[in-house]
Image (spheres, grey):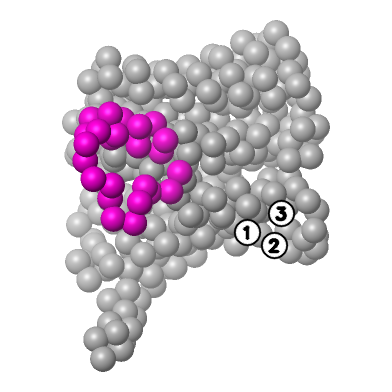
């Protein structure tokens, strides 16, 4: 009887927030058509922040927005795996893959250390590291599930990623032209340095089909690293907890999984796509669906961004800038030497 009551109450509690997220996604898709440099995801997270900071969010919208920010986001991350075919990634060649691995790995490791020096909250620093080094908001959400972080950490990291990632759409092509980079060099640099897949696509699309192909493939090589980095973070957190409380009894149900189930699903989808068993019609339909789901989820996450807190958290903004400069500089040096 209780279960039936909960089931009946679910639509009443959740549908208002879900409907608002759907309307925000529709708006983001329309705006993105007129401003292709801005992805629906970036527009949606900005709209979510605007709703929160203008005081337009009623409390009854919260359950539905939390649903899209967590459940829908997990589905989107799983589907993101269907966009990655490992044979395609391997066509980049060893030098480019080395650049991607070095820039991603060093940025992910060094950013939390810099955060400690700047006295940024560890959870915020880790999420900024994930967002900058791997794949923006998707990585922040995935890492949040495995890290000791709260909603304020997520909001700070999302705000930082949105600011610097959007700036990169303009800055990277201008710097590439000033430095005299070739089309392939620009593609590798954008894919290895810029935060979001959509931001990389915007740079590539403005620079020609050849640049777009290289840039997206290099970016997807970074996205592949999402699962192992989440797993490594979880194992490190578990080891730290064991060291701090060696005699504590095991949590009921045993240890938590090495990675969240949806991250394992992402990895499984990468394998499925790499095996080439899916029809082309399905793989072609997945990116637009994933984009819509990500935009909905990021609108929900954006409603947690408090601009006043972000403005006061100047150290987090500074850390995001240093981390962005770090991955940009490492990847540019690699491009100059190896591409």
Residue at 73%, 64% (x, y): give it: 282
Looking at the rendering, in which quadrant would you find the N terminus? bottom left
At horizontal 36% and vertical 47% (from top left) the residue drawn is 255
Residue 37 appears in view = no
The residue that mark 3 highlights is 272
Label 1 – label 2 distance at C-alpha: 6 Å
Instruction: Determine contact: label 1, label 2, CB under 8 Å.
Output: yes
Marks 3 and 1 in Cβ contact (< 8 Å) = no
Per the image, label 2 sits on a secondary structure element best described as: helix
Compared to 76, does 46 lie above or below? Answer: above
Of 21 and 254, nearer the camera is 254
Residue 141 to residue 265: above or below:
above
Q: CA distance from mark 3 to mark 1?
A: 19 Å
Label placed on residue 150? none
Q: Name the residue: 21% across, 41% down.
A: 248
Res. 312 image quadrant: top left
Tell which of 202 and 270 is nearer to you: 270
Q: Which residue is mark 2?
A: 285
- At horizontal 48% and vertical 17% (from top left) the residue drawn is 326
Secondary structure of residue under mark 1:
helix
The x, y position of residue 205, in whole percent, is 69, 39
Q: Which residue is mark 1?
A: 288
Give the residues in magenta: 234-258
């Amino acid at each position: 009887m209780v279960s039936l009551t909960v089931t009946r109450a679910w639509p009443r509690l959740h549908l208002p927030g879900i409907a608002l997220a759907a309307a925000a996604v529709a708006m983001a898709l329309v705006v993105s058509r007129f401003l292709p440099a801005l992805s629906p995801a970036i527009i949606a997270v900005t709209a979510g922040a605007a709703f929160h900071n203008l005081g337009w969010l009623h409390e009854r919208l919260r359950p539905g927005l939390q649903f899209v920010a967590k459940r829908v986001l997990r589905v989107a991350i799983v589907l993101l795996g269907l966009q990655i075919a490992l044979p395609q990634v391997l066509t980049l060649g060893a030098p480019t893959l080395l650049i991607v691995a070095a820039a991603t790995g060093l940025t992910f490791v060094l950013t939390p250390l810099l955060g400690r020096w700047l006295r940024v909250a560890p959870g915020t620093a880790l999420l900024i590291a994930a967002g900058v080094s791997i794949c923006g908001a998707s990585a922040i959400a995935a890492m949040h599930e495995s890290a000791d972080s709260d909603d304020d950490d997520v909001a700070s990291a999302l705000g930082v990623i949105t600011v610097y990632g959007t700036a990169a759409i303009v800055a990277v092509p201008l710097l590439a032209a000033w430095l005299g980079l070739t089309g392939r060099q620009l593609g590798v640099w954008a894919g290895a340095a810029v935060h979001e897949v959509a931001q990389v696509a915007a740079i590539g699309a403005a620079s020609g089909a050849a640049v777009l192909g290289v840039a997206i493939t290099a970016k997807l090589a970074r996205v592949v690293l999402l699962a192992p980095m989440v797993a490594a973070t979880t194992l490190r957190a578990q080891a730290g907890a064991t060291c701090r409380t060696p005699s504590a009894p095991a949590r009921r149900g045993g240890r938590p999984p090495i990675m969240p189930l949806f991250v394992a699903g992402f990895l499984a989808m990468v394998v499925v796509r790499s095996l080439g068993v899916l029809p082309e019609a399905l793989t072609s339909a997945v990116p637009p669906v994933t984009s819509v789901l990500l935009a909905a989820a990021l609108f929900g996450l954006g409603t947690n961004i408090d601009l006043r807190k972000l403005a006061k958290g100047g150290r987090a903004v500074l850390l995001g800038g240093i981390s962005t400069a770090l991955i940009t500089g490492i990847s540019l040096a690699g491009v100059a030497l190896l591409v």
